[in-house]
Amino acid sequence: MAPAFGPFGITRGRHRAGGWFPLYTRKANAMTWVGGNTTEATTTSTTAVDLLSVSGLSILAAIPFVIIGGGRKTTGGVGGRFDLGLKINTTVTAEAIVAEGLFFSTSTTNEAQNGLFFTVIGSRVTNYNQVGQGFYGNYTATTYVTNFQAPAFTAAIPIATVTSVVLRAISPDAAITVGADETNVYTLATS
Amino acid sequence: MLYMFLGFPKTLLNAGGLQHCVEEVERLAILEHDPAVQHSKEGVFIVHGSVGERQGMFEYRLSRQLDQLGVTWDWFPENWGFGNGVSVHKTTANRETMLVDHRTGASVADLIASGRPINLGKLRIQQVPKRTEGWVAYEKRWRSGTCPQESHILHLTWLITKHRLPEFAYLRLERIIEDSSTVLHDVERYQERHFSPVRKWEGESQKPSKEAEALLGKL
């Protein structure tokens, strides 16, 4: 059955108004999509591609934020590592490079794997522009595969209002489909 | 050459499934898979790790539905990566809202922050969209007047081919991706991994609850 994506394939929704949480403020950046169908972003690209983006953000430079999401790969070819990278606004801060594991990475085993990435980006001020830390982990159906600290930056984070967060992706082999989904951005309270 | 279409493929094929369809089943195109070739907004690059050497610009074709919606080449900001092969991209655009007093337009948060006692009974509270810096930047990417003025998800599907496609192949590709009535040829040649599941958010209803509608009717 065809998905009901609405006019021109756009899934429309509304966001839940902000509310206070013990640790952080949940603003429009943390979306609750309602009333529509949706699905993941996928690619077979063997060079870095902009796979999934969260746009319309307005995170001031002094405001820390958290990025949480999931990545996966299928079997195919001779296997290999699938990697995600991170782009903030138009700056690629951690490029998606096969076998580098800068932001998110699977193991090389030719099997379906999926996992979580969790990254905190701190306040970006003069001389503090690589203030990110996080981790990611991958699993098969029953096995814990990898667990690393991330990200490693290939470029400094822009000291500016963050208006978009983009996941870059690269597949190790065109026969492998890689994907990402359920990526949310949460701003942290500073007062 | 870059071919771009609107939406997640209506046949529910994911990027790998669409590639299987195009290269193996229906043989519509030869896709670019060279791990050194990257297409981006600025042109074609030969890449080694995070370093690339620009080779020139490439041809692109955006579908009619994209044009109708308001997504043109300008929708893609600088440094946008199209990679190679097949990609099904997803953008979520978030529209923040705020509570204001309907009569004065004053923000309820600002009124409360003033520290003075507020008689909420005298306010007519309304939730309105906020024009944030991020939303304005996103809106500018669309052709003037076409950006949906609410939170939404936009899927784009693109393919990088080695050569320009003949028109019959392009039209078939367009139907496979944008036409929900299209039936795939040789369906038995696809596997489960070629499709992505579609899900519906079940947490909340988009419409007001019956209780809320009843209350709104009385107000």
Image (spheres, helix red, strand yellow):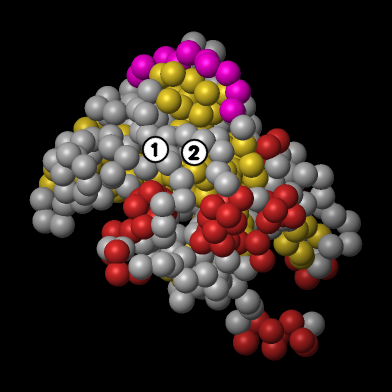
Label at residue A45 = 1
Label at residue B160 = 2
Q: Residues within 10 Å of mark 2 (few under 14, many from 20)?
A: many
Q: CA distance from mark 1 to mark 2?
A: 9 Å
Mark 2 secondary-structure assignment = strand
Mark 1 secondary-structure assignment = loop
x%, y% of residue A26?
51, 51
Against B190, is B138 above or below? above
Against B11, is A132 above or below? above
Amino acid type assigned to the residue bearing label 1 in the image: Ser
Residue B163 visible in the current orientation: yes
Mark 1 or 2, which is nearer the eye? 2
Which residue is at 41% across, 57% downward?
B26
> Is B53 within the magenta?
yes
Report in which chain the residue with disc 1 lies. Answer: A
Which residue is at 43% across, 67% downward?
B184
x%, y% of residue A35?
56, 71
Give whichever of B155, B95 is nearer the camera.
B155
Read off the magenta span: B48-58
x%, y% of residue B100?
77, 57
x%, y% of residue B44?
52, 23
Which residue is at 52% across, 49% downward?
B157
Amino acid type assigned to the residue bearing label 2 in the image: Ile
Which residue is at 21% across, 42% downward?
A77
Residue, far right: B103
Against B150, is B120 above or below? below
Report in which chain the residue with disc 2 lies. Answer: B
Cβ atoms at labels 1 and 2 below 8 Å apart: yes
